[in-house]
Image: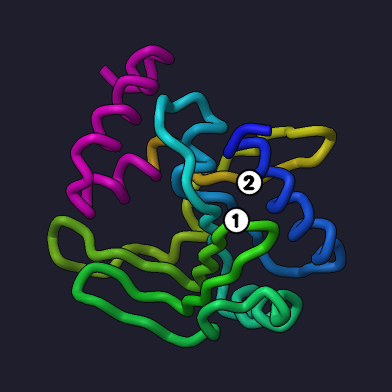
Amino acid sequence: MNVLEKNLKVFIKILELTQDRDYPIILSGSTSLNMQGVDIEVHDIDIVTDKKGAFTLANRLKEYQVKEMAFSKTDKYKSYFGKYRIDDVDIDIMGDFQYKTKNNLWSEKNHLHPLKQLEYKKHKISVLALEQELIEYESANKTITISKIKEKLNKEKIIK
């Protein structure tokens, strides 16, 4: 089983633990990018949700906790943030995640941005649209990832 498949198996496990949820669970980061066809190495699972979702997930995943859910802020990012580990897969959960834009303002909360629905083994998975991921990676100045997302978007003729 490759890293993407292993991560998606763990992500599905989280979805199944939260079937009764009334908050978003959105896959982001390297797993989401690779799943959408971006030629990028897969690392951990990044989950974007709102504040309620962050604390509800923290409670449901307590036995897997590595870093307790709490508000975290740097000069580039702010969110409710916690770390978990399931079946040797690292998971970052971010509630009400925001990043600094190029004009030095805080972005809209991430879970409110455009989403795309993907299907994996009969499960619907919400992911941030590639265009949104591009904006976020540009704000973080992650040049290699930026070029790989642009390459994928260019192939799909989404950007010129």
SS label for mark 2:
helix
The answer to which of 99 and 92 lies nearer the viewer is 92
For label 1, the residue is 89
- Number of residues whose C-alpha sits closer than 10 Å to that of mark 2, classed few (under 14), some (14–19) or many (20 or more): many
Query: Is residue 79 shown above or below 99?
Result: below
Q: CA distance from mark 2 to mark 1?
A: 7 Å
Q: Is residue 149 inside the magenta stretch?
A: yes
Q: Residue 68 or 134: which is nearer the viewer?
A: 68
Q: Residue drawn 65% across and 62% down?
A: 24
State yes or no: discs 2 and 1 in contact (Cβ < 8 Å).
yes
Q: How is the image coloured?
A: rainbow
Q: Is residue 9 magenta?
A: no
Q: Check the picture and name the quadrant holding the C terminus.
A: top left
Question: Which portion, as a residue range, is magenta?
Answer: 133-160
Residue that badge 2 annotates: 7
Pinpoint residue 122: horizontal percent, then vertical percent: 84, 34
Q: Residue at x 63, y 82 (%)?
A: 55
The residue under the point 60% across, 76% down is 54
Q: Please, what is the three-letter code of the amino acid marked with disc 1? A: Val
Q: Is residue 40 above or below residue 51?
A: above
Give the amino acid at mark 2.
Answer: Asn
* Relative image position of residue 75 (x, y in whole percent): 19, 74
Q: Residues within 10 Å of mark 1 (few under 14, many from 20)?
A: some
Q: Residue at x 69, y 52 (%)?
A: 11
Determine the image quadrant of residue 142.
top left
The numbered dot on residue 133 is none
Where disc 1 sits, the SS reads strand
Q: Locate residue 104, reporting x and y percent.
A: 15, 66
Give the image location of residue 3, x and y in percent.
58, 38
Camera-side residue: 81 or 101? 81
Choose between 31 and 28: the one closer to the eye. 31
What type of secondary structure mainly makes up the magenta span? helix
